[in-house]
Image (spheres, helix red, strand yellow):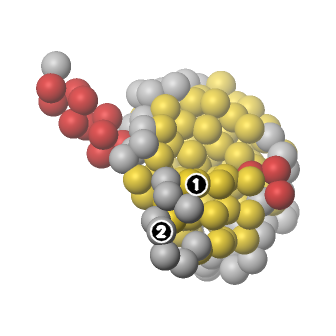
C-alpha cells in the first residue's frame, strides 16, 4: 500500500503515517485514550507530514488553548463536547461534529466553558514548518 493515507474522520478512526510496502499500518482511534490532564490543555500528535499536521487536544472544564495566531490553514473538528472558539474577537460555540475553518494568521483562542470534557482535532495544511519555509522563500 504505497503512499496511502486514510483519514476516516466520520468514523473517528485515523490511519496514520503513509504506509510503504511491507510496513505496518498504525490505526488510531481518537475516541480512546483522550489525553486529558489536570494541569491544563493536553495534546497528542496524530500525523506529522509536510502536507499535514494533525493533533488532538483535550480540555477539561475551564481549560483553554491560549490566544495565538493560526500558523497555517487550520480546521478544528470537535469530537467530544463543546468549545468556544474565538476568532479575531468573535466567539463561536462549536459542538461535537462541528468543523471550524480558520484562515492562516487569524488571531484565535479555544476554551472549554462547559461542565463536560471536550476534545477536538486540529488539522493544519500544510504543516506549519512548511508555511515557515514558504515565507522565508519570498
Could you tell me residue 135's position as x and y percent?
Answer: 22, 27
Please indicate whether residue 106 sits to the left or right of residue 93 in the image: left
Comes first in the chain, label 1 or label 2: 1
Local SS, label 1: strand
Local SS, label 2: loop
Cα separation between marks 1 and 2: 13 Å
Q: Residue at x 51, y 65 (%)?
A: 19
Q: Which mark is residue 17?
A: none
Q: Which mark is residue 21?
A: 2
Task: Write down the residue under mark 1.
Answer: 5
Q: Residue at x 49, y 32 (%)?
A: 73
Q: Residue furthest left?
A: 137
Q: Residue at x 63, y 64 (%)?
A: 15
Could you tell me residue 25's position as x and y percent?
Answer: 58, 73
Q: Residue at x 66, y 71 (%)?
A: 28
Toward the viewer: 69 or 50? 50
Amino acid at each position: 500500500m504505497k503512499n496511502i493515507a486514510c483519514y476516516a474522520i466520520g468514523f473517528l478512526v485515523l490511519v496514520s503515517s503513509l504506509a510503504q510496502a511491507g510496513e505496518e499500518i498504525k490505526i488510531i482511534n481518537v475516541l480512546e485514550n483522550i489525553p486529558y490532564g489536570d494541569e491544563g490543555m493536553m495534546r497528542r500528535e496524530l500525523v506529522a507530514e509536510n502536507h499535514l499536521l494533525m493533533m488532538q487536544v483535550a480540555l477539561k472544564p475551564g481549560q483553554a488553548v491560549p490566544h495565538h495566531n493560526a500558523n497555517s490553514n487550520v480546521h478544528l473538528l470537535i469530537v467530544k463536547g463543546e468549545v468556544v472558539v474565538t476568532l479575531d474577537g468573535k466567539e463561536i460555540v462549536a459542538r461535537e461534529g462541528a468543523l471550524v475553518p480558520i484562515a492562516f494568521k487569524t488571531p484565535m483562542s479555544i476554551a472549554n466553558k462547559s461542565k463536560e470534557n471536550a476534545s477536538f482535532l486540529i488539522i493544519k495544511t500544510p504543516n506549519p514548518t512548511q508555511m515557515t519555509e514558504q515565507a522565508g522563500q519570498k
